[in-house]
Amino acid sequence: MIKTQGLSKTFLIGKKHDTALKAVDELTLEVHEGEVFGFLGPNGAGKTTTVRMLTSLIRPTSGSAIVAGYQVGKDDIDIRRNVGLLTESPGMYERLSAEKNLRIFAELYDVPDVNKAVSKYLSLFGLWERRADAVGSFSKGMRQKLAVARALVHEPKVLFFDEPTTGLDPEAARIVRDFILEFKQEGRTIFMTTHNLDEAEKLCDRVGIFKQSLLALDSPANLRQKMFGRKVVFHLGGVDPQWAALIEEVEGVSGVELLEDKIVVSMTEPETSNPLITRLLVEQGADIRFIGEVRQSLEKIYLEMLHGNETRQA
């Protein structure tokens, strides 16, 4: 649904435009149909520039991209017609009502039943009672709700969300997340930039960690395993130091660490090794109270990719 090959963007800056600033460097990736893809990176990493290229708002310096079957730089009008875009700082016609704002865009997109679409999305985001009020009187959260509604009003095949829940209260943010999942179930494709790593982990099938170039690309679970492996903690009533050597002999175990009344075991496949270790500990007379897998957060993966050794030394 989205495919890039060596996509790059260089801006010429300075008074004489004689200084080159590379915002996106050789981005190659593929986002599949029906996938929620998270694009993660710090401010200034080039995420928004990438979204602008993929939505045909700016042209790439080099490389190519295909979105919804259309080529960036060639089929720009078709791309704009078939995508929905929520920018980080969405602009509105502040003197016009919420209803009029949404109606304008529904008509521009040739939505078949404008009245139905406008009513649906104003109601969905809790704006129906304020539909006649000027957008200039809205809070930041209410403007964000309207911006999300605007991105969805023509029910596009591909959605680009740049920080979609910024400024929303918890209930409104949940509505946006639920709608993202609903669109996914309908087979639509969502490309989402976010700083909310917990949100990305819950919503995204895969994530790309990005800083001018792509540093990592995979599902959160696979990234976690690649970077940290898998660890299981056995909580015991007491620990005999001799058990460590026995556990190290179990197939699939790569490391054993004793911590007070816990044994932390690194292994490749807990589903296979856990029963063997549990049986061994029971045979040794261990009082097993609880067994749980250690889950490294997406935040830790993100920081490791961006800062490497600096993070490990902190």
Image (spheres, rainbow, N blue to C red):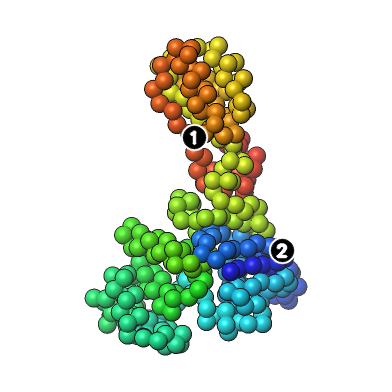
Secondary structure beneath dot 2 equals strand
Residue beneath the point at 52% across and 55% down: 205
Mark 2 or 1, which is nearer the eye? 1
Q: Residue at the left extreme?
A: 129
Would residue 260 be found to the left or right of residue 174 on screen? right
Label 1 environment density (alpha carbons within 10 Å; few <14, some 14–19, many ≥20):
some
- State the residue position of label 1: 294
Evaluate whether residue 35 shows in this view: yes
Front residue of 188/10: it is 188
Identify the amino acid type marked 1: Val
Vertical order, 292 against 169 (above or below): above
Front residue of 211/279: it is 279
Residue beneath the point at 48% across and 17% down: 281
Evaluate whether residue 260 shows in this view: no
Vertical order, 301 against 78 (above or below): above
Image location (x, y in percent) of residue 76: 61, 82
Front residue of 49/95: it is 49
- State the residue position of label 2: 26
Secondary structure beneath dot 1 equals strand
Residue beneath the point at 52% across and 22% down: 277
Image location (x, y in percent) of residue 152: 42, 74
The quarter of the picture where residue 4 lies is bottom right
Residue beneath the point at 46% across and 24% down: 234
**Of marks 2 and 1, which one's residue comes earlier in the chain?**
2
Identify the amino acid type marked 2: Glu
